[in-house]
Every structure is written in C-alpha cells, then in structure tokens.
Amino acid sequence: MQLHPTPLPQVFRVESPAHSDMRGSFRRSWCADSFAAAGLDFVLRQASLSTNPHRHTLRGMHWQAAPAAEQKLVRCVAGAVWDVALDLRPNSPTFRHWYAEDLSAENGRALFLPQGVAHGFLSLTADAVVEYLIDAPFTPEAARGARWNDPAFGIDWPAPPALISDRDRDWPDFPNV
Ligand SMILES: Cc1cn([C@H]2C[C@H](O)[C@@H](COP(=O)(O)OP(=O)(O)O[C@H]3O[C@H](C)C(=O)[C@H](O)[C@H]3O)O2)c(=O)[nH]c1=O
C-alpha cells in the first residue's frame, strides 16, 4: 500500500494496486507494515460497512469527541462515493479546510483520517458500500456532527443530497470561534 500526503496534515490518500488476471483481481485492503512505515499508530478495534442503495445519499459530517476520538481508514467496496475529510483540529494550519477524493470499488482508493478530522460522503452510484476500519470502540454519546452545507467550510459537493438523515440535515452552524 502507498500512503500519499494530502493538503490536510496526517490525512493520507491510500493507494493499493490490483493484481488482475482472468479470474478477477486481488488487492490489499489493510497493511499494518505500510502504516507503521508512515509513522501511523493504527490498531484496528472495529470494522463497519455502510450500504447506500440510492445515488446521492449523503452521510456526515461526523466525528467522535475525545476521549472516544477515532482514526479511520475509509474505502468504497461497491459503487463509488465522493469522500470528504474536514479538518476540525483547532490548532491545525488547515483548520476548517476540507479535502475530497473519489473512492470506488474500481480504483480501490482509501482515505486515512486522523483524530479531529470529520468525515462524510456523497454516494455517486446506486448500491454504494463504504467500509470503515476504526481504531476505537463505538461510543454513541461521543458522536458529533457538522452540516454538509455549512458556510464555515464551503464544501464543494458534486451534487446536493437526494437522501440525508434529519440529524445530518439539521446540524447547527459550526461555532464561529
Ligand atoms: C457509526 C456507528 C453507528 N452504529 C449504529 C448506530 C445507529 O443505530 C446506526 C446508524 O448510525 P449512524 O446513523 O450514526 O450512521 P452514519 O450516519 O452512517 O454514521 C457514520 O457515517 C459517517 C460518514 C462516519 O464517518 C462515521 O463512521 C459514522 O458517523 O448504527 C454502530 O453500531 N456503530 C458505529 O460505529
């Protein structure tokens, strides 16, 4: 696996080549050695799948508050999503900046998000499935969110959501600190 820096410190685009033959393909989806070589301390605690039957489903922007903060490796294992990392680390030089990548089953690309970086995605196809590898147990009371169209961030989504939860639609404006 190759970890490539992005404009957001410690957010990495993760590429893993597919080995294809007439049967199909084989592609690494996790490699402790690659992450250790990049200086990342990432110990898997939970893995989850998010299924999204409808195109233009939007989930996010979500993060877990300390001490339940998460690092997560996100990949699309069916269909395609427009995946967004949003830097909410107050001391980061890119505080409130966002970065997006097209993740798809076809390109096998993943995004690594450190603690303090919110995550969200817009599905670009029907039946998009997103896989999460996360280094913390799920703590419901630590769940936090910000609105996808909050002017504090100016996330340039490829399309508005056709489907979004009430909770995600109604997150308050991000504090103007
Ligand atoms: C996140 C999570 C949820 N759940 C349960 C709680 C609810 O009963 C149900 C759906 O949860 P929620 O509506 O929070 O799911 P999403 O809106 O897809 O949330 C996720 O989507 C954004 C984009 C993320 O990056 C996070 O991983 C996560 O916040 O699954 C669990 O049991 N474990 C979990 O780790």
Image (cartoon, rainbow, N blue to C red):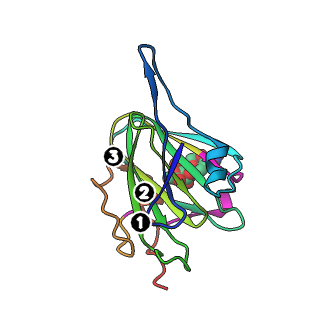
Mark 3: amino acid: His
| Residue at figure coordinates x 64%, y 67% from the top left | 65
In terms of depth relative to the viewer, which is nearer, 61 or 135? 135
- Alpha carbon of mark 2 to alpha carbon of mark 1: how far? 7 Å
| Residue at figure coordinates x 63%, y 41% from the top left | 31
Q: Earlier in the sequence, mark 3 or mark 1?
A: 3
Mark 1 element type: strand
Q: Which residues are magenta?
A: 133-148
Q: Which residue is mark 1?
A: 98
Categorize mark 1 by other alpha carbons within 10 Å: few (<14), some (14-19), many (20+).
Answer: many
| Mark 2–mark 1 CB contact (< 8 Å) | yes
| Residue at figure coordinates x 68%, y 52% from the top left | 42
**Res 113 quadrant in image:** bottom right
Q: Which label sits on residue 64? A: none
Mark 3 element type: loop
In terms of depth relative to the viewer, which is nearer, 166 or 86? 86
Between marks 2 and 3 in the image, the one whose residue lies nearer the viewer: 2
